[in-house]
Amino acid sequence: MKAFNLGIILFATVLLGGSGVSFAAEKGEKADRGKKEYEAKCAICHGSTGKGDGPYREFISKIPDLTVLAKNNKGVFPINRVYEVVDGRQVIKAHGTRDMPIWGREYSIAAAEQYRDVDYDQEAFVRTRILALIDYLYRIQAK
């Protein structure tokens, strides 16, 4: 995967309001886009707290605890690795087998359905959704 481009990160930061919480929600509250992505796509396996204790845990042999990604990487949150795993469209042999869904492809399909009548940048749509999710994962890391 290509290294993160500062422009992409700045675009996502502006779009997501820096912390992933700028989308308007009901009753004047701010929605946490990253948390919503996590709850919709990840919690079924990784659990609501990210510890790998979701409802599908009995069907999958090994579900990682997402709250210790930084701890397991010498205190540094592995943003590129997480991005590659979540996106999943590029096969990385060193990562081993893939049990997790390929969310990059799912986001691309969602973009095509949502924006079929307007001009848009499909990859920007995908990156924004993935970066919102990564922002949330960063925020739930064990201290």
Image (cartoon, rainbow, N blue to C red):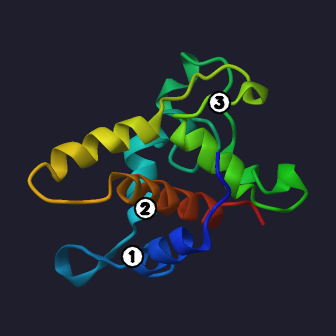
**Residue at image coords 48%, 42%:** 43
Q: Is residue 69 left or right of residue 40?
A: right
Image location of residue 110, percent across then percent down: 26, 44
Given residues 11 and 135, the one toward you in this image is: 11
Residue tagged by mark 2?
Answer: 128
Asked which quadrant contains residue 137, the reply is bottom right
**Residue at image coords 61%, 39%:** 85
**Residue at image coords 85%, 49%:** 72
Q: Earlier in the sequence, mark 3 or mark 2?
A: 3
Given residues 99 and 15, the one toward you in this image is: 15
Residue tagged by mark 3?
Answer: 63
Q: Quadrant of the C terminus?
A: bottom right
Given residues 124 and 68, the one toward you in this image is: 124
Instruction: Give the residue type that dot 2 points to.
Output: Thr
Vertical relation: 98 (above or below) 83: above
Q: Is residue 44 left or right of residue 122?
A: right
Image location of residue 55, percent across then percent down: 48, 29
Instruction: Give the residue type that dot 3 points to.
Output: Ile
- How many C-alpha atoms fall within 10 Å of the one at disc 2: few (<14), some, or many (≥20)? many
Residue tagged by mark 1?
Answer: 15
Tag count: 3
